[in-house]
């Protein structure tokens, strides 16, 4: 059965696909948002959602490790873009 997390994940993926013709920044930003929300357990992309709880100090986080691995791969593949955008921030 699909939940609101599945619908959020589907919506974000569709937005990322639709925004591809408008430029890479918007599409990659939406993809990053989808993977981040998926990693934190707010969005789901598979029918079976496996969530692990990680405690950092007094803070408990729900983490989906499949999305975390995809997020790390996404960041590694887009490292040059991230570095370029970071350097454009006025200081």
Image: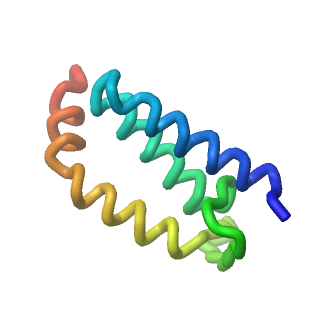
- Quarter residue 75 falls in: bottom left
The N terminus lies in which quarter of the figure?
A: bottom right
User: Count of labels shown?
Assistant: 0
Q: Position of residue 81 (x, y in %)?
A: 19, 41
Indicate the quadrant where residue 17 lies. Answer: top left
Residue at 34% x, 22% y is 22
Residues 10 and 91: in front is 10
Q: Please name the residue shown 74% across and 53% down the image.
A: 5
Q: Quarter of the image for the C terminus: give it.
A: top left
Measuring from the top left, give residue 21's x and y in whole percent: 33, 26
Query: Is residue 53 left or right of 74 when viewed as pictured?
Result: right
Q: Is residue 42 left or right of residue 90?
A: right
Q: Residue at x 16, y 32 (%)?
A: 87
Q: Position of residue 82 (x, y in %)?
A: 23, 42
Along the viewing direction, whichever of 10 and 77 lies nearer the viewer? 10
Q: Nearer the viewer, residue 53 or 29?
A: 29
Q: Residue 25's x, y, as percent?
A: 31, 30
Q: Is residue 39 left or right of residue 20?
A: right
Identify the coloring.
Answer: rainbow
Classify 55 as above or below 73. below
């Amino acid at each position: 059965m699909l939940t609101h997390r599945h619908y959020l994940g589907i919506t974000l993926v569709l937005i990322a696909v639709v925004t591809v013709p408008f430029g890479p920044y918007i599409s990659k930003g939406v993809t990053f948002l989808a993977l981040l929300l998926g990693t934190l357990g707010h969005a789901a992309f598979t029918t079976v959602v496996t969530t692990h709880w990680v405690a950092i100090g007094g803070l408990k986080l729900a983490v989906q490790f499949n999305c975390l691995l995809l997020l790390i791969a996404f960041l590694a593949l887009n490292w040059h873009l991230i570095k370029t955008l970071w350097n454009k921030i006025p200081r």
